[in-house]
Amino acid sequence: MLTVPAYGATSATEPLTPMRIQRRDLGPHDVLIEVKYCGICHSDISHARSEWRPEPYPLVPGHEFTGIVTATGTDVTRHAVGDRVGVGCMANSCRSCANCRKGQEQYCLRGTTLTYGSVDRDGTTTQGGYSTHIVVDQDFVLAVPDAIGLAEAAPLLCAGITVYSPLRRRHAGPGSKVAVVGLGGLGHLAVKLAHAMGAEVTVLSQTLKKQEDGLRLGADHYCATGDPDTFTALSGSFDLIVNTVSATIDLNAYLSLLALDGVLANVGVATEPLSLNGYNLVAQRRTVTASLIGGIRETREMLDFCAEHHLGADIEIIPAQKINEAYERVLASDVRYRFVIDASTLA
Ligand code: NAP
Ligand code: ZN
Ligand code: ZN
């Protein structure tokens, strides 16, 4: 067992504090990673505060991190000491159910082992990347291509794959019109990725405050959803809308922005029930869908795509001592565009 420094929540209502946690001894298929950078996802806040389900405490969040392999188990073949690697939201799955066999481990029928807050295959509770070291099964460790910096790569492991997956599945590319709702961690990567795929990209943000950034990130158009004229002007114009908003929004207003056979893909997680107008759906044969991150194979493909297009997250690196402040800034939509913890400040 290795005892390592971490930052975590002791309850749903207290700020995160420094703590020490234990990492298991290396099993034959395990990799020991020295964490270098860990992104702060909006979901970390929802988990830390038990907004989606009661979480086990103490809870160390962090499900998009990168680092260096410092030791490997006896049967590890995929990674070697010194390799640049990353881990996303999953630490394991059953490998044998129908969904795992399809490379959709995030929908494992026996329950995906999440990187934190899950009961691991050995019965212990998983703890995430706000820590200096972690032990993960080699199959859930991803090689980070040399073309992407470790800090810029960290947010790709959750935010990146979460938006890459619906963009790919819904064929974003030349000739397609894609709107991204919310220019935060997920949203800014959706803009970069959709632009790199060749789509015509529109940002739908609450205000025009971040317009210059949006256009620099690759958007062709930028509109404020706070302005009712936006919805009239853009009526029926998009093939795909990727909704990354963390709060409940009026989905009916966004549905009417879709063209014939258009798709509204939700990746943001609103906790209140969604309300949809049936007529708005049938009128143009529209589809509403939602998805959770992406599988391991698809995550590898996303990393290769990002390397090929020299694409990483726009980040603000912070020391661990600023995590609680960063949480408040994320909640206030004051993030440009992902906070990344420098794990060396945890020690
Ligand atoms: P984030 O950085 O906070 O971005 C969310 C953006 O939504 C904000 O920057 C803001 O953009 C917009 N927004 C926030 N509150 C709003 C409101 N009341 N009305 C309208 N727009 C609002 O969060 P994130 O890390 O990108 O995560 C976004 C959501 O995705 C969260 O719910 C998170 O839990 C979820 N998530 C889901 C998955 C998945 O697998 N499906 C994976 C990761 C995260 P503007 O300022 O531009 O309006
Ligand atoms: Zn996340
Ligand atoms: Zn499975």
Image (cartoon, rainbow, N blue to C red):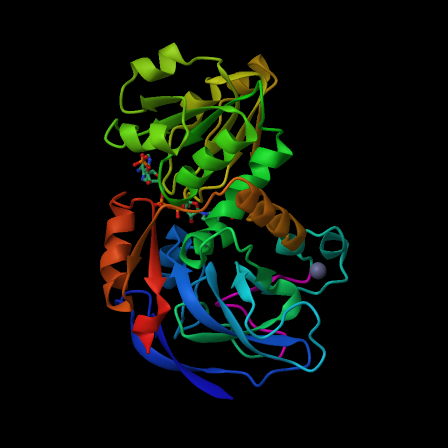
The residue depicted at 56 percent of the width and 72 percent of the height is 119
Q: Determine which quarter of the picture holds residue 336.
A: top left
Estimate the x, y position of residue 140 in percent, counting from the top left.
62, 63
Q: Determine which quarter of the picture holds residue 263.
A: top right
Q: Is residue 116 above or below residue 271?
A: below
Inspect this view and state whether residue 64 appears.
yes
Seen from the viewer's position, the closer of residues 17 and 288 is: 17
Please check the rendered image and state whether residue 37 is part of the magenta-colored stretch, yes or no. no
Please check the rendered image and state whether residue 118 is part of the magenta-colored stretch, yes or no. yes
Instruction: Tell me which secondary structure the magenta stretch mostly adopts.
Output: loop
Using residue 83 as the reference point, say whether residue 235 is left or right of it. Answer: left
The residue depicted at 49 percent of the width and 30 percent of the height is 195
Q: Is residue 2 above or below residue 293?
A: below
Q: Determine which quarter of the picture holds residue 120.
A: bottom right
Using residue 330 as the reference point, say whether residue 163 is left or right of it. Answer: right
Quarter of the image for the C terminus: give it. Answer: bottom left
Residue closest to the far top: 233
Using residue 157 as the reference point, say whether residue 72 is left or right of it. Answer: right
Inspect this view and state whether residue 291 appears.
no
Estimate the x, y position of residue 335 in percent, counting from the top left.
28, 46
Count of labels in the image:
0
Estimate the x, y position of residue 303 in percent, counting from the top left.
57, 49
Seen from the viewer's position, the closer of residues 287 and 149 is: 149
Q: Is residue 341 above or below residue 236?
A: below
Estimate the x, y position of residue 142 in percent, counting from the top left.
59, 60
Q: Which residues are magenta?
A: 110-122
